[in-house]
Amino acid sequence: MLKVNDINVYYGAIHAIKGVSFEVNDGEVVTLIGANGAGKSTTLNTVCGLLHSRTGSIEFLGQNLGSIPAHKIVEKGLAHVPEGRRVFLHMTVEENLEMGAYTQARSTIAPNLERVYEQFPRLKERRRQVSGTLSGGEQQMLAMGRGLMSNPKLLMLDEPSMGLAPILVEQIFDIIKQLHKAGTTILLVEQNARMALSVADRGYVLETGKIVATGTGGELLHDEAVKKAYLGG
């Protein structure tokens, strides 16, 4: 579904992503793990067209995304739930969700809303509430729901557990499992490596802009170097 080949991304003179290659197959959960500053978010921002690689290629469903603007990439079925949630704080929950459907035919909005509300009952309870008054966990659910409103073939999640209490982290990962079970392909960026690898079919470890290890979620959970660096022993 997604094939990233030898991308190199710079911030001015800083070489942030160094020859990164990976792929995501239909129906998988694939995770990118690594420390702060490893290049995880930069990689997702490059895939979705917000940043551009000087080399290589990014193919989604067989089409090269190199010259396609970000909003057109969304139309092709690739949705990005950004780090920090980025909900529209002065709009209601339902208005935020409707914004996620801007690439969709109007006739699809009502049924898509119902699907999102079925997945996130809390959002249905809060649908008339201004989003800035939601808790962090509710805002994360809203950001994920907004991404789902575009009917994505691939959902990219950037640090969905960031800043959340442990019980909410568990809820968010339960939702990720449910989305996967329902057939959504997911590319997950996470600092919580243990949780990410526990739900992932495959994972890639990023260090200072390079992929240094890859394997199934189970293999990486039991890899001694990964355990020492990211799993507390």
Image (spheres, rainbow, N blue to C red):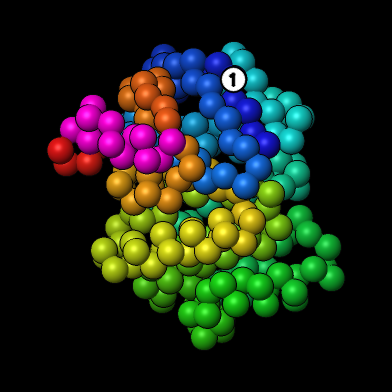
Q: Position of residue 200 (x, y in %)?
A: 45, 45
Q: Which corner quadrant holds the N terminus?
A: top right
Residue 153 against residue 233 in the figure, above or below: below
Residue 95 against residue 50 in the figure, above or below: below
Quarter of the image where one finds residue 107: bottom right
| Residue visible at 75% across and 74% down in the picture | 111
- Which is more toward the observer, 187 or 70? 187
Determine the main secondary structure of the stretch shown in magenta.
Answer: helix
| Residue visible at 54% across and 26% down in the picture | 22
Note whether residue 16 is visible. Answer: no
Residue 63 against residue 75 in the figure, above or below: above
Note whether residue 48 is visible. Answer: yes
Quarter of the image where one finds residue 103: bottom right
Q: Position of residue 49 (x, y in %)?
A: 62, 34
The secondary element bearing badge 1 is classed as strand
Magenta stretch bounds: 216-228
For residue 94: magenta? no
